[in-house]
Amino acid sequence: MEKTLSILSVLDKSCCNDVIFIIFDQKYKIIYISPIAVRQQLALSADALVGKELSNLLDPLDASTFTSKLSFDTFEPQQIDYLELRCADGTNMAYSAYFQKFRYEATQKELMLAIFKNKLQSSSMPEQKNTLIVSAINHSEEAIAIVNDNAYIVFANNAFLRWHGLTETELKVLRFYEIDSSINNADKWEIHKSNLQKDLHKTFEMSFVTAAGTSIDVEQRWRYHIEGNEGLYVCYMIPIKERKETEKKIHKTLERQHILSQIAFILNTHENFEYKVNEALRLLGNFMQVDRILIFQNILSNKATSCTFEWHSDDFIARRFELQAIPYSLLPELYHELNNNQHVVYEGISNIPTELVPYFRPYDIHALMAIPFKFDTHSSAGFMCIVDHKQRHNWKESDKRFIRTFTDILTSTFRQKQNIDLLLKSERRFRELAELLPEMVCEAAINGKIIFANKHTQVQFGFTENDLSKGIIFFNLFHPNDRQRVLDNFEKLLSGEHINNEEYTIINREKQEIPVLLYMNIIMQDQLPIGLRAVIVDISERKIREKHLENLANKINSAPFAILEVDKSGKVTYINEKAQQMKLLLNEHLPTITRHAQTAFDAKDKLSHTLILNGCAYHCVYNFNPHTANIDLYVIG
């Protein structure tokens, strides 16, 4: 590095009038800058610039594009034909720049050597210019002219002379406003000159007609410089055809993205589905400037197709209702192409398959594109057909990609609509079934707000379908003593735990407490819990029966006579308190009881006999009970 800096110092002394050497790193931080040259040409201090970013030295317009024009990825020489460096007094100096990347061996750090060549060393004629600078300017594709205060052109490069059809001799006697279409008189030149002195630079876009009669779009850039006591006005005319085409492509791409965003937004919800699909087709049709767009959906196991949606321009009438249940056997070519290609394009009347022509009469088909809808990779679910009845369309690849993206959005929308329809159909079936059930059935969101309740639930708790929008909380249906338990079990279900169905108490519209059995599970959507579904079973009657049976059992147990129950094998399965007191299970009595019980089993009827117990006679009645399939024995005496 020391050797390099030593050489640059020598060069700085000999080239300080028109060359500036700069070394900077990959962050564009200045490591070295020619101290003599930068002081002499820009009136700046090298010490103040070292360590600063190179952008601080560049004109803001050039600084914004500098990094995109220069690459640290190559060791090949690089060149930028035109850059402006900022002087201490706020004016700019024009330079061409040459760059060479090198590696500093001591640190293996990659650095860039820049050689800035002054384009305008003085305001004198080209003969007094540096030969290399004049040569570079003359070979530039830009048309460059230097104009003095009196509007005389003191220098013009070859491109400027060629565009204007002038010779150097003619140039010497012409003022700039005599050859320019926009600044075409002395007054306009004075105004233009005054604005430049104030703003230092101006940029215009204009259409320029060359001497050969060719019209080209150019960007005219003006820069104001002070050389000594003289002001110079430098005009650069740059062809912008490629930039215009690029801007046009970008604009078209942004317009396509905007249309697709609008369409995606429109189709984001499925309310008024038919209207929204038609609106999406309208946006596409107007943007593509075609006459008709149709959506066909397959029927009869993909053996036929029907037009389900259509948009057409005002110049034509609808054809949708004439395009129903068309067998694919009548469209063999189209069917084959749709199953084997991403899109099918026909241009010109003579190229349209004859099988399609009858379906659009009395209109001709000048252009047709068909794009298949595929819900999976195996078979087509239908297709979209774009038709122009008036002109051919040379659809570009970007147009085809745009239309395919549209069909992808539409396919996704149809698939979602199909799934939603199936879900709604399933939900309708569930709700119809729920209305038939004699139990209370309801659904609630994850926050507990009830979103559905069958009629039985509404009657029990005294609310209507319209009241659900006010926010009825599922957990509030239960007795305050049970609410926390219901909540705890709900949280257990959310965490994946299994819970047994439990008994709770609800409070109905008449403030009555009703015992219920609660069956509850979680509603899942896209593997996420979104709510709960519950069946509430009123067990009031069962509780009454259980209480009745309990009372009856107590009465039987305390009856004043003996009661026993014997199964088919002769085993005694129940004995009340009186029978225990009478000691009827003693071995001496069991054979008799078992024998008579077996006889009653066989006869499936009632029989009786007398049993002598402790010297007393007891009347025994054996009764076959069909509900329990056991023998009930009553010993009375």
Image (cartoon, grey):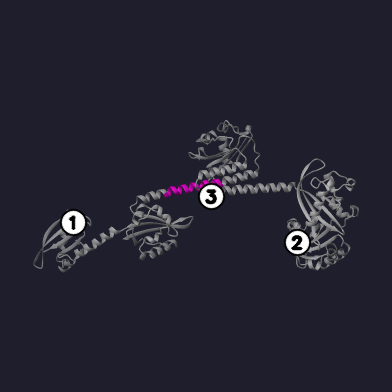
In the rendered image of this protein, does residue 143 appear above or below residue 548?
above
Percent x, y for residue 523?
44, 56
Quarter of the figure with residue 537:
bottom left
Of the image marks 1 and 3, the number of the one nearer the N terminus: 3
Q: Amino acid at mark 2?
A: Ser
Main SS type for the magenta part? helix
Q: Amino acid at mark 1?
A: Phe
Q: To which residue does mark 3 refer?
A: 268
Q: Is residue 305 left or right of residue 103?
A: left
Q: Is residue 545 left or right of residue 389?
A: left
Does the stretch in magenta take in 426?
A: yes
Percent x, y for residue 119?
84, 56
Mark 3 vs mark 2, CA separation in Å: 47 Å
Disc 1 crowd rating (10 Å Cα; few below 14, some 14-19, many 20+) is: many
Looking at the rendered structure, the secondary structure element under dot 3 is loop
Q: Is residue 262 left or right of residue 91?
A: left
Quarter of the figure with residue 311:
top right
- Which residue is outermost to the front? 187
In the rendered image of this protein, does residue 365 appear above or below residue 109?
above
Q: To which residue does mark 1 refer?
A: 624
Looking at the rendered structure, the secondary structure element under dot 2 is helix
Of the image marks 2 and 1, the number of the one nearer the N terminus: 2
Q: Residue at x 22, y 63 (%)?
A: 551
Q: Nearer the viewer, residue 111 or 484?
A: 484
Q: Which quarter shows the C terminus?
A: bottom left
Q: Which residues are magenta?
A: 409-427
Q: Residue at x 64, y 34 (%)?
A: 348
Q: Amino acid at mark 3?
A: Asn
Percent x, y for residue 609?
11, 59
Q: What number is the disc on residue 55?
A: 2
